[in-house]
Amino acid sequence: MTEDKRKAHLLKLFSSMSGKTKIVEPMKNIHGTLRDSDAIEREVALVMREIIEQGIFKTSLKPIQLAKLVTSFYAGKNDTEIARELGDEKLSKTVARARVRLKLFRDLDFRMPFDKEQMEVLIESGKTMKEVSEELGVSPSTLREYRHVIEEQEDPTIDPYIDRIRDVMEDRDLSEQMTRSATADSLGESIDITEAELIDVT
């Protein structure tokens, strides 16, 4: 029997033989000592409100929705999945633009189907976006999307706010690591207690 199966078996036996709460109590002590996901989102939302009030960028998304966008991005969700979490899959393009504005880039954002330097030369030549897109062989909307990514990457205006958001998210990661570690330690301690009590019983 593997270690995990052994522990699961012991836990099952323990819970069936006694009403003790030694396994539950350590976890209760952990809960509430570290910021939960809702608290993290509220903190990010406050930063988002500042960004919007300062007029740094405009979006139809509310501060709390932008905060959800950030936490979902860090959780590995794509734009469509984030839009679904916000309640409407049709918001995927709005999510994508806001995400790029917040410098939450994906590798796909930089996989341009044309040469970046060639695009910049054509734009600086005075050609219209339609003319540039035709020469590059892409649609004007596609050209605008990639140009938006480049512009936001180079624009430092929002950087101080982005740094604050990253600090919050790093604190969240640390909290999660501490919670996982503490929970694992508590479970391990409970298993040890369970084993000792099983020995007494048998």
Image (spheres, rainbow, N blue to C red):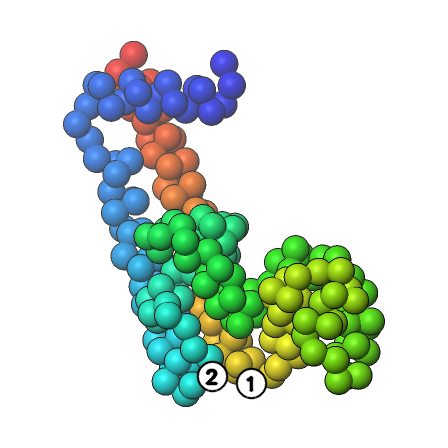
Q: Is residue 162 left or right of residue 146?
A: left
Visible in this render: residue 174? no
Q: Position of residue 72 (x, y in %)?
A: 44, 55
Q: Is residue 166 left or right of residue 111?
A: left
- Please tell me which residue lies in front, 23 or 126: 126
Can you name the residue that lies furthest to the left here?
Answer: 19
Q: Residue type at mark 2: give it.
A: Ile
- The quadrant where residue 51 appears: bottom left
Q: Residue type at mark 1: give it.
A: Thr
Q: Position of residue 131 (x, y in %)?
A: 73, 72
Q: Are marks 1 and 2 in contact (CB under 8 Å)?
A: yes
Q: Position of residue 135 (x, y in %)?
A: 79, 67
Q: Position of residue 124 (x, y in %)?
A: 77, 83
Q: Earlier in the sequence, mark 1 or mark 2?
A: 2
Q: Secondary structure at mark 2?
A: loop
> Mark 1 = which residue?
157
Q: Secondary structure at mark 1?
A: loop
Can you name the residue that lies furthest to the bottom here?
Answer: 54
Visible in this render: residue 156? yes
Tell me the crowding category of disc 2: few under 14, some 14 to 19, or many 20 or more residues within 10 angstroms, Cα based. Answer: few
What distance separates the C-alpha of mark 1 from that of mark 2?
8 Å
Q: What residue is at 65 percent from the left and 55 percent from the top?
A: 108
> Mark 2 = which residue?
56
Q: What residue is at 70 percent from the left and 78 percent from the top?
A: 128
- The quadrant where residue 139 appears: bottom right
Give the label on residue 3, or none. Answer: none
